[in-house]
Structure formats: structure tokens, C-alpha cells
Image (cartoon, helix red, strand yellow):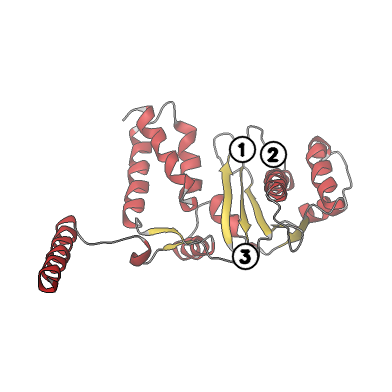
């Protein structure tokens, strides 16, 4: 296995957010993958093969409001104690953007790691909102950013700086500025309803399946994936149809 082959797995995260977390973890070993990492890659490929019929089913809607979720797993990496931060952004009922990444700096507290995730999600919301404005698409309500950390939500709406949060003051000011300007609203959501949870950590089978479906990754009906008949069957049907047309023309003459 070469590094180039190893990197190919990243392409699948463009349409499969359900593997974003594990691919983010595997990407930490891009330049020196071992047999152990290759075994994990093969397991991911087997999962993709078993769920090849899964994909996004976008629902038409007049509601184009922006909703986002941000989450973090503080000090998740046992080697360097760096966190995993993630977010997912919905336009109406459809997921349009997501990210799972490992920050370069070590977070000193869970509040700091959660705020890093909140900052990334807020930046994505601002970009998407500006894009919609350029396309002259109005918003029915201001974007809502959900997080499952009460102290982070309080800090975003009423920042009180002290020694433990001074080093993230820029991020706090950015989000606070967006809140004051009415660009977005930060709200609290219980961890059980945190949709970005599957982008930050490993979950149980039932939890993973539940959040996967809530992200919009479902088994797409066969009729939406095109004709599932074999090429020979299609050719035979086409030949039969052409023969019938010729017979009808002959009878008409």
C-alpha cells in the first residue's frame, strides 16, 4: 500500500459524512501508514461496500433557513491529547456542509475545544449566508447554531474574560460579534440530540445508525438510482421494442 492509495479514501467523505470521523483519524498517518492502518482502511472499505446503496436524498422545500451543529471531543488523542472538532450545516432539511478535523493546538479545557468547534461552524454559516445573499435567496429566520456545552453558549452571548479563556478571546469576539449583529443565534442542545456527535468520536451501533439517518445518509430507493437491469436485458428490451415498431409500420402500409 502506498501513501497515494491511502489518501484515496478521503474522496469518499465528499458524499459520505458517516465516515468523516474515521477518515480524519486515519489521515493522521498519511505519510507513514502501517499494516494496522491498512486493516482499518479495509474495514472502512467493507463498510462502504455494504452500504453502497446509501446516499443523500435531498428533500425539496421552500424553507432555506440555516441550521448548524458543532461538537468537540476534548483531548481525544491519547498520544498528543489534541481534540477533535466538528460541525454540520443544514440548509432547510438537507445537509450541505460538514467537517471533522484535529486542531493543531492542544485545548486546555473542554470549553476551549467546544469553542474552537463553534468558531469553525460560525465561519461556515457566515460564508453560506453571504452566498445565499449573493444569489438573492432570502432567509426566513436567522441561522441557529446548536452546541451541547452550556458554558460555551453562555460565553457566546455574554462573554466574561478571565485567565482561562484569554487565549481564545479572538474566537469569542468573532462569535459574539455575529450574535450582536443578528447574523446567527447560539442555542443549547442536549448531547442526545447533537447531530455532530458522530463526527467527533466512535459510537455504539444503534447511536451511529440513528445519527447517520438524521444527517440524511439513507438507503436510496432503487428507482432513484436508475435502471438496475443488466445491459443484456436492456439491449433485449430495446430490440423487442424496435421489432414491434417495424411490425406496426408494416401493418400500417
Label 3 vs label 1, nearer the camera: 3
State how many labels appear.
3
Numbered mark located on residue 82 in the image: 1
Determine whether label 1 and label 2 are within 8 Å by CB.
yes
- State which quarter of the image contains the N terminus: top left
Q: Quadrant of the C terminus?
A: bottom left
Q: Which one is nearer the viewer's eye here, 33 or 51?
A: 51
Residue 229 placement (x, y as % from top left): 22, 62
Residue named by callout 3: 193
Q: CA distance from mark 3 to mark 2?
A: 24 Å
- Using the image, tell me which numbered label, if any, was put on residue 107: 2
Give the answer, above or below, for where 107 lies relative to 87: above
Q: What element does badge 3 sit on?
A: helix
Farthest front residue? 253
Is residue 169 placed above or below 250 in the rendered structure?
above
Image quadrant where residue 65 sits: bottom right
How far apart are the alpha carbons under marks 3 and 1? Answer: 24 Å
Give coordinates of residue 185: x percent, y percent: 78, 57
**x 59%, y 64%: residue:** 93
Q: Residues within 10 Å of mark 3 (few under 14, many from 20)?
A: some
Under circle 1, the secondary element is loop
Q: Position of residue 50 (x, y in %)?
A: 32, 56
Q: Earlier in the sequence, mark 3 or mark 1?
A: 1
Along the line of sight, which residue is nearer the eye, 56 or 80?
56
**Residue 196: quarter of image:** bottom right
Amino acid at each position: 500500500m502506498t501513501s497515494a492509495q491511502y489518501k484515496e479514501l478521503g474522496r469518499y467523505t465528499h458524499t459520505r459524512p458517516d465516515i468523516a470521523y474515521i477518515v480524519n483519524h486515519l489521515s493522521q498517518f498519511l505519510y507513514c501508514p502501517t499494516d494496522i492502518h491498512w486493516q482499518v482502511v479495509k474495514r472502512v472499505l467493507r463498510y462502504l461496500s455494504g452500504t453502497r446503496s446509501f446516499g443523500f436524498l435531498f428533500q425539496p422545500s421552500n424553507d432555506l433557513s440555516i441550521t448548524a451543529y458543532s461538537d468537540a471531543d476534548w483531548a481525544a488523542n491519547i498520544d498528543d491529547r489534541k481534540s477533535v472538532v466538528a460541525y454540520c450545516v443544514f440548509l432547510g432539511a438537507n445537509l450541505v456542509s460538514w467537517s471533522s478535523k484535529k486542531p493543531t493546538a492542544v485545548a486546555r479545557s473542554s470549553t476551549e475545544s467546544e469553542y474552537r468547534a463553534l468558531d469553525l461552524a460560525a465561519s461556515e454559516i457566515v460564508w453560506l449566508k453571504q452566498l445565499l445573499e449573493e444569489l438573492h435567496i432570502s432567509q426566513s429566520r436567522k441561522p441557529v447554531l446548536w452546541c451541547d456545552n452550556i458554558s460555551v453558549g453562555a460565553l457566546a452571548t455574554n462573554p466574561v474574560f478571565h485567565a482561562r479563556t484569554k487565549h481564545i478571546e479572538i474566537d469569542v469576539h468573532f462569535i459574539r460579534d455575529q450574535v450582536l449583529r443578528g447574523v446567527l443565534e447560539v442555542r443549547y442542545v442536549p448531547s442526545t440530540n447533537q447531530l455532530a456527535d458522530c463526527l467527533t468520536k466512535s459510537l455504539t451501533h444503534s447511536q451511529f445508525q440513528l445519527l447517520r439517518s438524521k444527517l440524511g445518509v439513507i438507503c436510496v430507493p432503487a428507482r432513484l438510482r436508475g435502471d438496475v437491469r443488466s445491459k443484456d436485458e436492456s439491449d433485449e428490451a430495446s430490440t423487442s421494442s424496435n421489432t414491434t415498431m417495424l411490425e406496426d409500420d408494416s401493418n400500417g402500409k
